Image (tube, coloured by chain):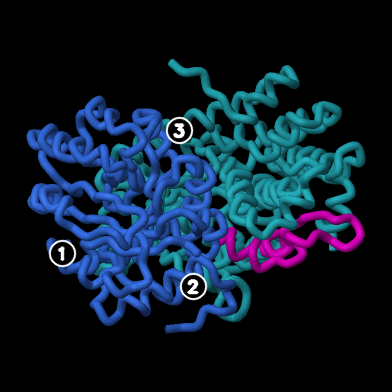
Chain colours: A cyan, B blue
């Protein structure tokens, strides 16, 4: 059997630690993706992609996870796409143990047009924003991936080609930061935090503890990995030669392709790739990934997960498991701050200039 | 100026003589003789000595896009007989079964990238596998196919970069949702302009847009805009 290999595992080996829950979730995710691939073998085409998001998309799937998915359509409209959607829905339900959320963001038929054309403005609804950003940050296509790849690249093209300062570089430091993309990610992160309060109200506090911990961990990971990926768009090009790449209009699609490759990694792997290159931060990454491993450990443990899912609102301060999880989220946050404000790498300066205001 | 011309199949399906007559007074210097249907091949090849191709400085032959494995050897032999003319033979990779046969054509074997209906030859990854099998083959870049597979044009960009040394000729048309070769539209012209700088000015351009005779000149103008003009000069047409 082939030895698994991905940046997070590579980082753990370099540091000399193990993150068993991350590894187990990754293995379980890949097994589940294989099952889905078989189940949906006749459902794919070059105009449509069944796309999984959420924990399965990030390859952090556990036995208690639901399967967030969409049928992405990028091609000629065909009434039979509805039948395809129903067929895929039936097959995915047979694999999933839990039903998806109530907001209608997932388990839905999604046209590429709104995702590509409606960025910002009145028509960019909360749902459209969420679908678009999750497509960039944590999506995995099942089966043929041509439609998925095409839509992702077209969304990235909009963010990058319409961002003049990305190509020109910032005035003082000549940083090539995709501001349009970065700001939309920040907007999405803040939207998730606001929606946390909204859902709390709409569900009368039901499930508040698990959602709170997910906000502090997996949702925050999405934002941070997106931030690091945006900074990587600048850092990945060696200093000598960087200006000639960004200054050459003929190379713009080359840069789009590089950015696409950066974002195609899983969120943990985006951070791990940065970690591998910065040995002086191994202690920080050990804390960051260690905390995340604990988080997945809770989600993999049915009893502890259930406990957080049913904990009454307002009782967290007296609940040992919730307090343990909150402390874990503080370790995660502190490690993130150490990484982002590290001055030995260029990340500290980039965070201060573009990640704060 | 980019050498431009048409595929005879686009102008007059199955009637290459009529297509060549339609091109007589047009400002074209290249042509692709199409035998896209299997039954067109023998009549075309048997007529080559009689055709007046003196206006063309570049000629290629498009092999049938579909034939049975049982007929592969005879089709190959017919095409191989014409090798001394030095004309590239444009092939759809999914039609090739006995690779050792086709390798004998060397760089006259010109592999075209495919539209999204086909099982392979559509993306840079799939083309790399093919060129591993046919290391001497040249490349017919179908920009309409590449756009149909990936409208972001990054796949087209990567193909042109990766296979620049193999690039022998260009196919251009808008490949519509029915996979038909249509005339260029405002949007396809803008898309093609994004990678036009990667196409050497000496590369023969074969127009595959299916157009009526009185539209040949207009389509040539659209192709010229797609391959040369800056974006702001393109007007909706």
Mark 2, residue position? B225
- The chain identifier of the residue carrying mark 2 reads B
User: Residue B229, percent across and down?
Assistant: 55, 72
* Residue A322 placement: quadrant: top right
Decide if residue A332 is on the left or right side of residue B221: right
Decide if residue A341 is on the left or right side of residue A272: right
Magenta part mainly helix, strand or loop?
Answer: helix
- The chain identifier of the residue carrying mark 3 reads A
Distance of mark 3 from mark 1, alpha carbons? 58 Å
Mark 3, residue position? A30
User: Residue B119, percent across and down?
Assistant: 28, 43
Q: Nearer the viewer, residue A219 or A320?
A: A219
- Describe the element under mark 3 as helix, strand or loop: helix
Q: What is the magenta range? A: A155-184
Mark 1, residue position? B17
Q: Is residue A108 above or below residue B69?
A: below
What is the crowding at mark 3: few (fewer than 14 residues within 10 Å), some, or many (at least 20)?
Answer: some
């Amino acid at each position: 059997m082939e030895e698994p290999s991905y940046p997070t595992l590579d980082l753990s080996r370099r540091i000399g630690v193990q993150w068993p829950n991350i590894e187990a979730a990754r293995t379980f995710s890949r097994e589940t993706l294989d099952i889905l691939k078989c189940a949906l073998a006749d459902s794919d085409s070059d105009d449509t992609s069944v796309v999984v998001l959420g924990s399965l998309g990030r390859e952090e799937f556990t036995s208690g996870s639901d399967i967030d998915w969409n049928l992405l359509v990028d091609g000629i409209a065909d009434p039979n796409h509805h039948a395809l959607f129903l067929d895929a829905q039936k097959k995915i339900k047979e694999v999933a143990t839990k039903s998806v959320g109530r907001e209608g963001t997932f388990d839905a038929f999604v046209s590429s047009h709104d995702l590509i054309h409606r960025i910002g403005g009145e028509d960019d609804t909360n749902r459209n924003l969420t679908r678009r950003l999750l497509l960039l940050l944590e999506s995995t296509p099942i089966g043929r991936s041509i439609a998925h790849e095409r839509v992702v690249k077209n969304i990235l093209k909009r963010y990058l080609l319409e961002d003049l300062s990305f190509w020109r570089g910032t005035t003082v430091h000549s940083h090539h930061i995709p501001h349009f993309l970065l700001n939309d990610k920040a907007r999405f992160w803040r939207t998730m935090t606001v929606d946390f309060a909204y859902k709390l109200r709409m569900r009368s506090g039901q499930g508040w503890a698990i959602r709170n911990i997910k906000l502090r961990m997996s949702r925050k990971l999405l934002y941070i990995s997106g931030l690091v990926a945006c900074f990587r768009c600048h850092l990945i090009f060696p200093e000598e030669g960087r200006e000639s790449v960004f200054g050459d209009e003929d190379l713009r699609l080359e840069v789009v392709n590089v950015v696409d490759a950066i974002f195609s990694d899983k969120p943990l792997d985006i951070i791990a790739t940065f970690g591998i290159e910065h040995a002086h931060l191994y202690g920080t990454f050990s804390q960051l990934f260690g905390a995340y491993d604990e988080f997945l450990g809770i989600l993999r443990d049915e009893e502890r997960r259930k406990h957080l899912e049913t904990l009454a609102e307002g009782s967290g301060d007296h609940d040992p498991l919730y307090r343990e999880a909150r402390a874990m989220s503080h370790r995660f946050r502190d490690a993130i701050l150490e990484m982002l404000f590290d001055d030995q790498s260029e990340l500290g300066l980039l965070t201060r200039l573009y990640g704060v205001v | 100026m980019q050498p431009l011309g048409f595929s005879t199949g686009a102008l007059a399906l199955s009637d290459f003589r009529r297509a060549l007559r339609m091109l007589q007074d047009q400002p074209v210097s290249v042509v692709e003789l199409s035998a896209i249907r299997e039954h067109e091949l023998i009549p075309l090849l048997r007529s080559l000595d009689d055709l007046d191709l003196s206006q063309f400085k570049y000629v290629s032959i498009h092999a049938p896009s579909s034939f049975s494995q049982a007929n592969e050897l005879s089709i190959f032999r017919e095409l191989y007989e014409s090798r001394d003319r030095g004309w590239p033979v444009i092939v759809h990779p999914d039609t090739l079964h006995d690779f050792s046969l086709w390798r004998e054509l060397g760089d006259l074997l010109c592999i075209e990238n495919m539209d999204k209906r086909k099982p392979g030859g559509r993306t840079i990854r799939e083309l790399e596998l093919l060129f591993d099998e046919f290391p001497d083959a040249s490349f017919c870049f179908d920009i309409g196919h590449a756009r149909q597979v990936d409208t972001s044009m990054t796949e087209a960009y990567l193909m042109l970069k990766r296979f620049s040394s193999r690039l022998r000729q260009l196919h251009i048309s808008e490949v519509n949702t029915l996979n038909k070769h249509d005339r260029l539209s405002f949007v396809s012209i803008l898309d093609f302009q994004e990678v036009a700088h990667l196409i050497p000015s000496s590369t023969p351009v074969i127009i595959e847009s299916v157009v009526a005779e009185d539209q040949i000149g207009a389509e040539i103008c659209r192709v010229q805009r797609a391959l040369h003009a800056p974006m702001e000069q393109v007007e909706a047409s």
